[in-house]
Image (cartoon, rainbow, N blue to C red):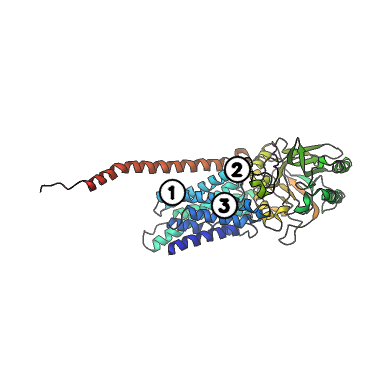
Amino acid sequence: MMHRFLGWAMTVLTAAMAVLAFPPHSQDAAGWFCLVPLISVMRAGWADWRHGWVAGALFWFGTMWWLAHVTVLGMVLLCLYLGAFWAAWCALLRLAMVRFPEATTRANLVISTVAAVGWVGLDALRGWLLSGFPWNGLGVSQFQNLGLIQIAKLGGVELVTWLVVFVNAIGALTVVRFYREVMRSQKLRPHFDFSVCLAIVAGAFAWGIGEIWNKPKVEPQMVGVGFIQGNIPQELKFDPVEAYGTLETYLNFTSFLANGGGGSSRPDIILWPETATGTGIFQDRALTEAVRDMMRKAQFSLLMGSIDVDRGRFYNSAMLFLPEEGSYRMYRKQHLVPFGEFVPLRRWMPWLANFAGMPGDYSPGDGSDAVLQAPAASGPVDMGLLICFEDTLPELARQRASRGARLLVNLTNDGWFRDSPGAWLHVANAIFRCIETGLPMVRCANTGVSCVIEPTGRISEIPLRDGARVVGLRGAFARDVAMPGAPGPTVYVRWGHRFPLCCLVLTACYVAYEFARDRKRRRAAEPIRAAQEVSLTSPPSGGG
């Protein structure tokens, strides 16, 4: 009974510590120890995959509860679904623990490697199934630890996740090993596994500090960027009656920035956030002409988010209007948000649309215009566009960088987060796109975190904030952004998503190996078991 209680208590403790590691708490140290309670009780045999599912579901409830502002049922189902990946990881870890029951350096290193590789492999699967949901990998908890997370240049945020899980596993197994040695159930020996773990962490941190201190050989190109955070309430954002008032807000702020307001010189590019106009700008002649008239006289480019309608299909889009021209170029969002922009499995389960409140779905773009060029006083600016949650997808940012982008631009709404930690979680995930690609990012939100993120992942400034509060603020500002003068592709840009995919393949191979080994052992034991049964049922020999 006590073992059962401890198993569930450690399960809840693991979930609580994992939640503390993420915004709004942002206690990154908790990320290095959050799995220790769960792994420890699993090593003792007091927990299994069910405890992992509960821990995972509680973690996702604790970090994604704000999705209830969009759909309560969708949030619950999503958290239970995501918790299943923790359950699968615990089942995998149990296989390794059964295979290596001893508490030795070799066993601990093997189990910890299986734990780290398996976690990253399952994260890769999570980022692909049902269009993918790559949010909040454990590595994201370290978004403030700039020295350590530079290794994302090598293998993406997944490499940071690998290291965090590896440290957790070594920590838990070291605790179990010390306990056995203190209780004299095994001899006291050097813990070389712990030493290896410390060496890896120290090496990663030292390399990251060197990358931060490494100054570029070519002077950066400076570009002036203006940000407008309209803070249009979500319930008014898509109301056609409010369309002209919303447009007037953005036009007034644009004029303010164009005349040198906002804390910097006149910007080369002004950003409006995702779906800034609410209604489709080209479906309303008055809205279209108001923007085009402004741009015919402008000395800046305007990148704005709006809805585009083409042949009955709706697209979440970004339009780039060039100065002194009435023409525009457009990017249509590639990766749509489940239950936010489309309902998964709508064809087979149409009743899900009733809970999401979505009569129809948006359509995805093909990504052909994901890199757009705008003029600037210092030279042309190649912008890699990311709308809303696309800045949480490593592969999309990598595609932009490999196609010549020198500045990542994220237009987002974040208004439906309301007063929740969702905006901070969003930017914490986005930080890793800058490190992975070696490019800066400018983020313009309807409400939330509008800011500049440097290639090292450092947020240079958040001008629109009131203490820790970033949601519910309206304003405009301009900043000079330094783009790399001659950006060389990072290892991640060159090699892409191969590290997590390799982890997924290795995980599948290990599971297949263990099942094959178990099947072979059972087959080998069948003749012995049959002989034993025969000997038990046969009458004793002898005369009478």
CA separation in Å, label 2 and label 1:
27 Å
In the drawing, what numbered circle is on residue 80?
3
Task: Pick the quarter of the image with the N terminus.
Answer: bottom left
N-term-proximal mark, 3 vs 2: 3
The residue depicted at 68 percent of the width and 58 percent of the height is 420
Disc 3 residue type? Leu
Q: Circle 2 sits on which residue? A: 130
On the picture, is 484 further left or further right than 504? right
User: Compared to 27, does 214 lie above or below?
Assistant: above
Q: Are marks 3 and 2 in contact (CB under 8 Å)?
A: no
Residue type indicated by callout 1: Leu
Mark 3 vs mark 2, CA separation in Å: 14 Å
**What residue sits right under mark 1 in the picture?**
95
Q: Earlier in the sequence, mark 1 or mark 3?
A: 3
The local secondary structure at tag 2 comes to helix
Where does the image place residue 209, in percent across and percent down from the top left? 62, 52
Q: Nearer the viewer, mark 2 or mark 1?
A: 2
Question: What residue sits 18% from the left and 47% below the top?
Answer: 539
* CA gap, disc 1 and disc 3: 23 Å
Q: Which residues are magenta?
A: 357-365
Q: Position of residue 266 (x, y in %)?
A: 84, 48
Q: Are marks 2 and 1 in contact (CB under 8 Å)?
A: no
